[in-house]
Structure formats: C-alpha cells, structure tokens
Image: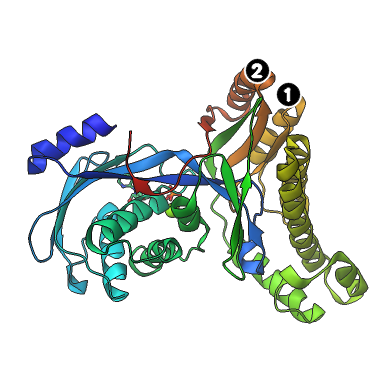
C-alpha cells in the first residue's frame, strides 16, 4: 500500500509527504455495555488507513485524493467550507474539531488509502479520523493533544459532521492500540488498562455474515430504555452499579423483558472481569467460554441476534472453536472467533460452505492480528 500511496502522491502533488497510519478495531467482549456505564474490551487490528501528508504552505487550503474512492476533493478550513463528499467530511471534521479545541491546522495535501473493510463493523471511519487527527497533531501542534483527546476529536467528527451518534470505543481503540495488548476501557470514568493477549496456538478471525437487518422500531433505543428503567428501579445511576442479587430482589416489580435485558448487562460486566483474569493467566479457554456466554446472552436475553449470526455461532461450536460471539450491536454484521491453530482451516472451510449452502452467499473472512494504534509510519 505504501508504494501505491507514494506514487499517487507524486503524481497528484509532486514529491513526497510523511506517512501516517491508524487501524480499525475489534472488540473481544463487552457489548451493549457502553451506555450502561460498563466496560468494553477492544484492540487495534492489522487493517488500517494510511495517509501521505505534506503541508502545502497555504493558509488553509486542503487538497485530498482518496485512492479507494478514486476521487479528489479540495476544501478550506472555515466552517462553511464543508465538502459534500462523505469520505472528505471525515477529514474536514477532524480539522475543524482540532481548530475548535484551539489547535492549529494549516493547508496540506494528502493521499490516502486503506484496507479496513468499509461498514463491516471494523470501524474504517475511526481509522480514517484517527489517522488524520494523529497526523495533524504531529505536523502542526507539536503533539500537544493527548491521545484521548485525539479519540474525542474523532468522535466529535462523527457527531458533528457525519451524523453518527457513536460512543468513544472505536476512536479510543484506534488511537491507543498496542501490539499484543487489548484494552479494557471503563466507559464511565474513561480510564483504561492494557491486558496482554498471547495468542500462541490460537488465531482471531472475524466472520462477516454480510447481512444487516433493518428493523422498524429502533431496537437499540428500546434496549436502552429498558436498562434505564431497571437502573431507576434499583436506585443506581446505571446498571454498572447493579448486581444480580439486587436485580432478583426487585424481580416482581420489573417486567419480564426488562429483567432479561438487565440480566444480560449485569452478566456481561462479570464476564469482562473474568476475561481480564483469564488473560493475565494466559487462559484462553476461559476467554472463549465467556465469549460463547456473551453470544448466548445477546441472543436469548438481550435479543439482538438474528438467524444468520446464531447459525455462525452454532457452526463455530460444532467445529470446536474456542470462543465465538456476535461483535457489535447485533442484527447482522460479524462474529468474532477465537480459534485453535489446528482446527482453523477446517473451521474456515466449514463455515464458508455451510453458510453459503444455507443463505446463498459466502461470509467474508477477516483474520486479525492485534496491532499498534495511530502512529507515524515506520517500516
Ligand atoms: P465503519 O463501520 O467501517 O466505520 P462507517 O459507515 O462508519 O463504517 O464508515 C465508512 C465510511 O468511512 C465510508 O463510507 C467512507 O466515507 C469512509 N472511509 C472508510 N474507509 C475509507 C477509505 N479507505 N477511503 C475513503 N473513505 C473511507
Ligand atoms: Mg464507523
């Protein structure tokens, strides 16, 4: 990718710039926990956006070329200059959010490309934001913005320029990622901790169902409302502070549905903590067990799975995969799988053919390696 980007830069702008990269992310465990004040457990992956960037000496003219879109875009840095192309709005948003925070952005030229699949749940948009946020921090601001602020710049970009009301996890992971470590982020305090993930003898692989069920009434909002109702009933700010004992003591005053939602969320908090201990011991079998339990909870209690995802989960189990679960909000998208090396090929063949037999198309397979976060590129 490096060579292709450098050649495109030379062609469009002449000479060369400085290369930066930022990755997409996966989430090992901790789903639907962010809005409950709980934990998520993401890591950066070996799929990334790479950009070649060079200040162009102008006061505020930005010229971009996206290799993957095969399109150019030029904009100014004033608020009214927002480009209409979606892909360029991510870069514009990052510039604006840096300026809003008192940072400096001057004119620059950039060429970029990526290999994070778009819209597959690996957060290509966060990779794009983090790549530029980190680059502009380095080029124009002496790196004075701390890493967490770069993540917030990306998040605000989604909110204010892309119409996506996302949490902080994706940008957080893209910015803070570290090779061989995943990060437990406390969504309430913003504190985080690195945990080693030693995968000797195992691989991580995402299986993308390539389905996305559009649902009529917003199931996400309904889940959120259930959680808020139960929290109120239990007298806690969020379900983060609730225990199963508390929930059971109030069982009679809670609807069956709300009870199930809360049971999942409280269970998920426990599972995340179990996974931390297991990772510290290097015990991947326990990690896998909790992944299956999370899937079960998302499917039967939180009810955000779908036939295709349950099917992928069943096949994983049949093949002897160590851990497998829905990754992301649900109703489609990927499963994340922890697979022993010795059964890996068999699992991939089986899941591919059985899924195709049943649903008429093959799932996409994305092997992932836990990698470093946003950085200046070095060979
Ligand atoms: P994801 O789940 O992958 O983040 P989004 O819909 O949030 O999906 O973001 C995808 C958008 O991000 C694309 O439509 C495009 O505008 C932008 N994007 C992501 N990767 C690239 C890329 N390699 N080149 C240009 N734009 C990209
Ligand atoms: Mg996105």
- Which corner quadrant holds the N terminus? top left
Residue under the point 57% across and 67% down = 190
**Does label 2 or label 1 sit earlier along the sequence?**
1
Q: CA distance from mark 2 to mark 1?
A: 8 Å
Q: Is residue 176 above or below residue 248?
A: above
Q: 282 left or right of 116?
A: right
x and y percent of residue 287 in the render?
73, 41
Verify CB contact (< 8 Å) between mark 2 and mark 1. yes
Q: Is residue 294 above or below residue 207?
A: below
Q: Residues within 10 Å of mark 1 (few under 14, many from 20)?
A: some
304 or 243: nearer the viewer: 243
Q: Which residue is mark 1?
A: 319
Give the quadrant of residue 75: bottom left
Helix, strand or loop under label 2: helix
241 or 357: nearer the viewer: 241
Instruction: Give the tally of numbered discs.
Output: 2
Q: 193 left or right of 239?
A: left
369 or 69: nearer the viewer: 369
Q: Is residue 23 above or below residue 130?
A: above
Residue under the point 53% across and 27% down = 362
Q: 71 left or right of 227?
A: left
Q: Which residue is mark 2?
A: 346
Q: 56 left or right of 166?
A: left
Distance from mark 2 CB to nearest ligand 1 atom below 8 Å: no
x and y percent of residue 343 in the render?
68, 19
Give the quadrant of residue 378: top left
């Amino acid at each position: 990718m490096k060579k292709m980007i450098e050649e495109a830069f030379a062609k469009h702008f002449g000479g060369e710039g400085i290369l930066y990269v930022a990755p997409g992310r996966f989430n090992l465990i901790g789903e639907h926990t962010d809005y409950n004040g709980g934990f998520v457990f993401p890591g950066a992956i070996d799929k990334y956006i790479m950009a070649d960037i060079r200040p162009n000496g102008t006061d505020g003219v930005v010229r971009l070329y996206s290799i993957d879109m095969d399109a150019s875009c030029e904009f100014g840095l004033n608020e009214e200059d927002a480009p209409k192309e979606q892909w360029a709005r991510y870069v514009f948003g990052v510039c604006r959010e840096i300026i809003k925070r008192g940072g400096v952005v001057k004119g620059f030229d950039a060429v970029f490309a990526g290999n994070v699949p778009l819209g597959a749940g690996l957060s290509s948009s966060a990779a794009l934001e983090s790549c530029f946020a980190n680059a502009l921090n380095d080029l124009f601001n002496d790196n004075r913005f701390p890493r967490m602020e770069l993540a917030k710049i990306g998040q605000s970009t989604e909110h204010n320029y892309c119409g996506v009301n996302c949490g902080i996890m994706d940008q957080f992971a893209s910015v803070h990622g570290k090779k061989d470590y995943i990060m437990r982020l406390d969504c309430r305090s913003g504190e985080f901790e690195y945990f080693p993930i030693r995968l000797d003898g195992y691989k991580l692989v995402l299986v993308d169902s390539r389905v996305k069920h559009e649902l009529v009434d917003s199931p996400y909002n309904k889940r959120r409302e259930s959680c808020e109702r139960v929290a109120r009933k239990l007298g806690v700010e969020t379900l983060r502070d609730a225990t199963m004992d508390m929930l059971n003591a109030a069982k009679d005053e809670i609807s069956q549905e709300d009870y199930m939602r809360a049971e999942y969320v409280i269970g998920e908090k426990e599972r995340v903590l179990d996974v931390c201990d297991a990772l510290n011991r290097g015990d991947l079998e326990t990690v896998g067990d909790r992944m299956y339990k999370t899937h079960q909870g998302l499917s039967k209690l939180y009810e955000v799975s779908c036939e295709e995802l349950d099917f992928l989960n069943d096949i994983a189990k049949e093949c002897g995969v160590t851990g497998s679960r829905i990754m992301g909000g649900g109703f489609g998208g990927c499963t994340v799988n922890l697979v022993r090396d010795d059964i890996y090929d068999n699992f991939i063949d089986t899941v591919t053919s059985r899924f195709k037999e049943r649903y008429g198309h093959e799932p996409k397979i994305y092997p992932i390696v836990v990698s470093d976060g946003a950085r200046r590129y070095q060979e």
